[in-house]
């Protein structure tokens, strides 16, 4: 029984490492040419935008208002506390989405260089 479990685990690991996993692109990476595309400042809401909360969470500044972002995670674009992470720097991003209950629900989120 142990041999079967080890065999299945090794093939699962090999499949994952070789990329035999379906390409599931997160919904917030799909640009909709019909929606407005905004260029915003993006960073950690509590570390750089002085927003309420004790947890590091991705936020944007859109038209001089600050919103926490639903969809992409703060660590989806590298470690939040790394040299260029959202907790250390404010970055520019292109976003699409809607404001719902004082949160920005992103349908598209792309960091700019």
Image (cartoon, helix red, strand yellow):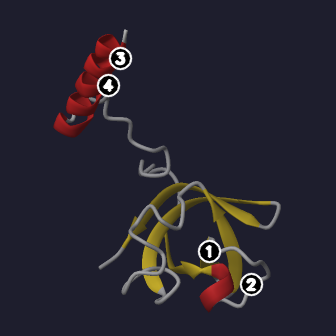
Residue at the spot of label 2? 51
Secondary element under disc 2, as helix, strand or loop, is: loop
Q: Say which quarter of the image contains residue 19.
A: top left
- Asked whether residue 82 is in view, the answer is yes
Residue at the spot of label 4? 9
| Left or right: where 72 falls relative to 15 | right
Foreground mark, 1 or 3, reads: 3
Q: Residue at x 59, y 80 (%)?
A: 44
Q: Earlier in the sequence, mark 2 or mark 4?
A: 4
Q: Earlier in the sequence, mark 2 or mark 3?
A: 3
The quarter in which the C terminus is drawn is bottom left
Separation (CA) of disc 4 from disc 1:
38 Å
- Asked whether residue 20 is in view, the answer is no
Residue 97 picture location, percent across and down: 60, 57
Secondary element under disc 1, as helix, strand or loop, is: strand
Q: Residue at x 25, y 26 (%)?
A: 10
Separation (CA) of disc 3 from disc 4:
6 Å
Task: Tell me the crowding category of disc 3: few under 14, some 14 to 19, or many 20 or more residues within 10 angstroms, Cα based.
Answer: few
- Relative to the observer, which residue lies in front, 62 or 85? 85
- Relative to the observer, which residue lies in front, 94 or 70? 70
Q: Residue at x 71, y 83 (%)?
A: 65
Residue at the spot of label 3? 5
Q: Residue at x 40, y 66 (%)?
A: 77
Q: Earlier in the sequence, mark 4 or mark 1?
A: 4
User: Dots 2 and 1: beta carbons under 8 Å?
Assistant: yes
User: Dots 3 and 4: beta carbons under 8 Å?
Assistant: yes
Residue at the spot of label 1? 59
Separation (CA) of disc 1 from disc 3:
43 Å
Please tell me whether residue 80 is drawn above or below residue 75 in the rendered image.
Answer: below
Task: Tell me the crowding category of disc 2: few under 14, some 14 to 19, or many 20 or more residues within 10 angstroms, Cα based.
Answer: some
Q: Earlier in the sequence, mark 2 or mark 1?
A: 2
């Amino acid at each position: 029984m142990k041999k079967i479990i080890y065999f299945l685990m090794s093939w699962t690991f090999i499949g994952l490492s070789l990329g035999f996993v379906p390409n599931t692109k997160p919904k917030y990476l799909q640009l909709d040419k019909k929606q407005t595309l905004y260029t915003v400042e993006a960073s950690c809401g509590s570390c750089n935008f002085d927003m309420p909360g004790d947890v590091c969470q991705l936020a944007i500044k859109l038209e001089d208002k600050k919103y926490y972002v639903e969809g992409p995670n703060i660590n989806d674009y590298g470690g939040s506390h790394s040299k260029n992470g959202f907790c250390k720097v404010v970055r520019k991003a292109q976003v699409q989405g809607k404001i719902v209950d004082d949160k920005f629900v992103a349908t598209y989120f792309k960091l700019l260089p």
